[in-house]
Image (cartoon, rainbow, N blue to C red):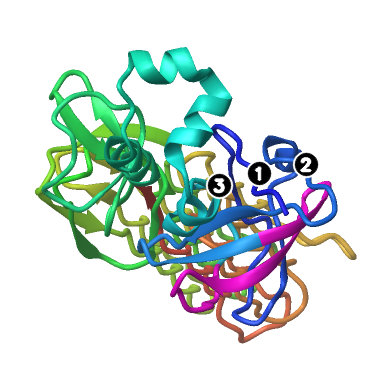
Amino acid sequence: MTIKLANNAVSRLAAALGASDTSLSVQPGDGAKFPALSSGDTFPLTLVKADGSLEIVTCTDVTTDVFTITRGQEGTTPIAFSSGDRVELRLTAGTMDAKFTDPIADAATAAGTAVTTAINLTETNAQEALARLALHSRYDQGDEPTTDQGDIWINGIGACRWDSDDSRYYRIPFTQKITFTSSDSLTLDAWTKYLRVSGCGAGGGGGGGAGYLSGGGFLPGGGGGAGKFTLNQILDVTPGDTLSINIGAGGPGGPGGSVGYSGSVGTDGGTTSITGLLTLAGGGAGRGGSFAGIALGGSGYPGGGQGGYQTTSPTGVYSMSGTGASSVFGGGGMPVTCSPNKADGGDARGYGGGGGGGNTPGDSGQTGGNGGNGSNGILIVEY
């Protein structure tokens, strides 16, 4: 039996791994980074979760990107892992015991007796060098290097990278993610220097439609606008700061008008922000249906649709209310037809969309449809 090794053989799990599973899959194409195995050959693997907990396994077969493994090696306990957790070929203590039982002989075989003599390789310093190699790139907090040693792993933090401006290690950015759908705060640890954010302000509410008009005609409300958005925006932050996360509330739709009266304007969507770092305005409210003119859609990113405008009601011809604007993160509220009964505009779906406008009913005695509600904002923070 031969224990195989390879430099820089690192990947991540392509699928979750249960505590009793005996095979794992690495990312497509990464199987080629690891040693090819003949019958009886093996190599050690260390599986590492995001929180730093780990398990050592032995790989006994490689088929493209699928590894057959023996679980819970070298005193570790089989545990469950998530897709994306690290898979690394590390030189473990068990490997050293098995492969380097006579370090001097092994070194002589690999490099020649003359080289071994020249570097004065003793059994003690050979084992020390191998031990350092086995632990290279993995450190406890407070014991990390003070000079650039390449990417390292810090227990409890994860993968870290040297920052030449600050002359210290920080977490490799954007390996963790938090999604905020309500206002909160975020306290940064000492290992975070950058954020990558995506999100949007809230959508505006749709305008209410005018109530039944005895002289005929339809005056539906306009649609609400979508909130401003950003995608993958990089923010510089100060490690240790506490950030105030504000998630904009969707604007309520405007009430429909009483019989013979105009509908009401909706409410603007709220602003989503990280105080002092990022501001994403909410979408504007749709106008209410009115004889004063077409009910415009609310301003936004994009703006909402305008309502139809008919001061008479020819047989079989009915106006539509304004459509709520769709956001990158959700759909706008649907419009409604002004026939024959009161109908409320559709509420926005997802995040950041505007509400649809309400209708004007065609049957007598009915109030106008209410505008649909805009949807709340959202903020996705990677660090």
- Dot 3 corresponds to which residue? 89
Q: Is residue 223 above or below residue 31?
A: below
Give the labeled residue for mark 1. Answer: 4
From the viewer's perspective, is 89 left or right of 377?
Answer: right
Locate residue 101 relative to residue 276 in the image: left or right. Answer: right
Query: Which of the pair 80/222 is nearer the observer?
Result: 80
- Identity, as a three-letter code, of the amino acid under mark 2: Ala
- Note whether residue 292 is visible: no
* C-alpha gap between disc 1 and disc 2: 8 Å
Which structural element holds mark 1?
loop
Callout 2 touching callout 3 (CB < 8 Å): no
| Label 2, label 3: how far apart the Cα atoms are | 13 Å
Q: Please determine whether, in this image, residue 38 is positioned above or below residue 334.
A: above
The vertical placement of 115 against 100, above or below, is above
For the record, the magenta segment spans 59-81
Choose the circle earlier in sequence order: 3 or 1.
1
Q: Are marks 3 and 1 in contact (CB under 8 Å)?
A: no
Q: Nearer the viewer, residue 63 or 275?
A: 63
Q: Which residue is mark 2?
A: 36
**Image quadrant assignment for residue 57:** bottom right
- Disc number lying in front (1 or 2): 1
Q: Give the class, few, some or many, for how many residues have Cα within 10 Å of label 3's Cα (few <14, many ≥20).
A: many
Q: Name the kind of residue labelled 3 in the image.
A: Leu
